[in-house]
Amino acid sequence: MPELPEVEVSRLGIAPHVEQHTMSQFIVRNPNLRWPVDARLTQLLKNALITHTSRRGKYLILHVKCVNDVRGVLMIHLGMSGSLRIVTHDTAVQKHDHIDWVFASHRLRYRDPRRFGSVLWHDETEGDYLLHPRLATLGIEPFDEAFDGGYFYERAAKRSQAIKVVLLGGEIVVGVGNIYASEVLFDSKIHPATPANQLTRRECNIIAKHVKKVLSAAIARGGSTLKDFVHSDGSSGYFQLEAHVYDRANLPCLMCKTPIEHIIQAQRATYFCPHCQPERPNK
Ligand SMILES: [Zn+2]
């Protein structure tokens, strides 16, 4: 499943091929994604200019200026299996290629076998896109300057859930998916079941630092796959994290050789080292 780093790498990969490009056509072969693609878009986006791209959480945003001066954004979510590719006009359409953005010399193509992704339109006259219902409730961006240990501590102090569950929830900070949550807590030497409101300021500083570090390392690693976004066969461009604990149950901890443990929290797998991340005594 694409997580925030994959979405950011997708954005970096397609940006040079879509920003300041005018699309002659917006082709929807199958509008039945998680939410239906607005049927008016085929007409509205004809000859529209993509001014720039951005990202909020796992939404990749295309900022659009239409010929009638209507401005808005296309909010693309890759769901479970979505991917974006730059292809030539004669690249054969495969079964799950649902949408094409057609530019003069190439196309942006959206493929999504499981169709849990979405392409939503937001007209600027309806207000700031960041206040769209899908975006308004998201936590702060991990690379936002305002996100630091103090920010995290203030909000964690109000939650009694396990820190792993709080990180994964994305209500304080977005982008810490299931793999990254285990990795961040291992790097921070904090047991994943620790109630968020028992964390000290110092521990929150460490967690915030590692959230930024783990996610930026994943994006940097994905940078080496950027060329795959262009003229490729459209195979998945998702990259593997070099995990320290995730999916390493019973294997020796890379720091201390203790076997990594595996537990389920909120129906999701968590991996941790019981020695490096000791459970704190009950207060
Ligand atoms: Zn260890």
Image (cartoon, grey):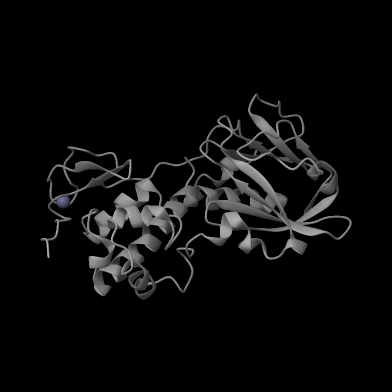
Q: Quadrant of residue 35?
A: top right
Q: Is residue 156 left or right of residue 234?
A: left
Q: Quadrant of the C terminus?
A: bottom left
Residue at point 74% right, 62% down? 126
Q: Quadrant of residue 207?
A: bottom left
Q: Is residue 273 left or right of residue 150?
A: left
Q: Residue furthest right?
A: 68
Residue at point 21% right, 59% down? 189
The reply to whether residue 20 is in sight is no
Q: Is residue 26 left or right of residue 120?
A: right
Point out residue 81 in the picture as x, y percentages from the top left corner.
53, 35
Point out residue 85 in the picture as x, y percentages from the top left corner.
63, 39
Position of residue 170 relative to residue 89, above or below, is below
Foreground residue among 59 and 197: 197
Foreground residue among 230 and 148: 148
Point out residue 157 in the picture as x, y percentages from the top left corner.
31, 69
Residue at point 57% right, 38% down? 82
The reply to whether residue 60 is in sight is yes
Position of residue 156 relative to residue 169, above or below, is below
Residue at point 35% right, 57% down? 166
Point out residue 113 in the picture as x, y percentages from the top left corner.
57, 29
Count the marks: how many?
A: 0
